[in-house]
Image (spheres, rainbow, N blue to C red):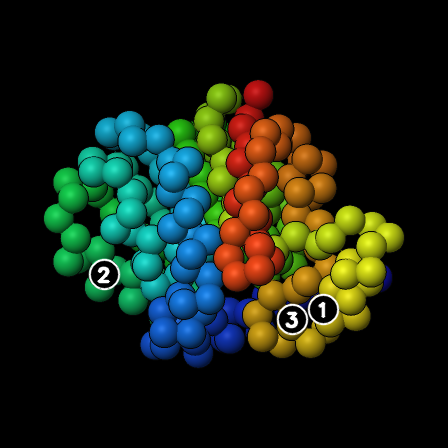
Amino acid sequence: MKCQVNPRYMEQLYSFYSPFYDYVFGKILGPGRRQAFKYVPRTPHQKVLEIGVGPGNTLEFYPPKTRFVGIDISHAMIAQARKKAAHLNSGSRFDLHVMDASRLDFPDNHFDLVMAAYVITTVQDPHKVCREIHRVVKPGGQIIAVNHTRSQNGSLWGRVEDVMAPVFVRVGFTTDLDVIRVMKDVGIAVQKTVPCNLLNTGRIIMGTKR
């Protein structure tokens, strides 16, 4: 049985993290976030959605003149992100909203790129979130997820991840979810995965909507 994520708990937890998120998780997870931007097109005026924007520590990495929308379930995180956006002068437009990733308030086929860094293992229904990502991205649009994903079935490390999942979910994420499989299940065409972060514990997962 997969470890269950409580959305209310996650909202409260990440609101608690918001004042010092950059100093703790930013150091641990930041390399993967930054590496992912190697694969972001430098196209001006592209419409970008970032799910789980957190305190806004990725805003400065988007190309100039990006039409950016960022969402997060935590009011405190969005407040931090708005402060950061106010000090950026890249010619981009930053719209930041408190929103549930499983119920995106955007039209179908709307964004050129959807970025989801360290989100899919923090939500109650990963399939529903990935279906929403697939829905709002344009056909041929790009999807980039940065995440830990469970090791292959039958591997020793995969069994360790299963055992540790209830512990790590208290920290803010689960370790027993095969993120790549979930993305494929909802119709996302996964094209490439790249190891990232310390000891290659994360993956940059790149896909598209056909």
Residues packed near mark 2 inside 10 Å, few (<14), some (14 to 19) or many (20 plus): some
What residue is shown with label 2?
Answer: 84
First in sequence: mark 1 vs mark 2: 2
Q: Nearer the viewer, mark 1 or mark 2?
A: 1
Q: Amino acid at mark 3?
A: Val
Front-lying residue, 23 or 70? 23
Q: Residue at x 58, y 39 (%)?
A: 193
> How far apart in space, not on screen, are marks 1 and 2 (Cα)?
33 Å
> How far apart in space, not on screen, are marks 2 and 3 (Cα)?
28 Å
51 over 136 or under it: above or below:
below
Front-lying residue, 202 or 104? 202
> How far apart in space, not on screen, are marks 3 and 1 (Cα)?
6 Å
Secondary-structure class at tag 1: helix
Secondary-structure class at tag 3: helix
What residue is shown with label 3?
Answer: 169
What residue is shown with label 1?
Answer: 165
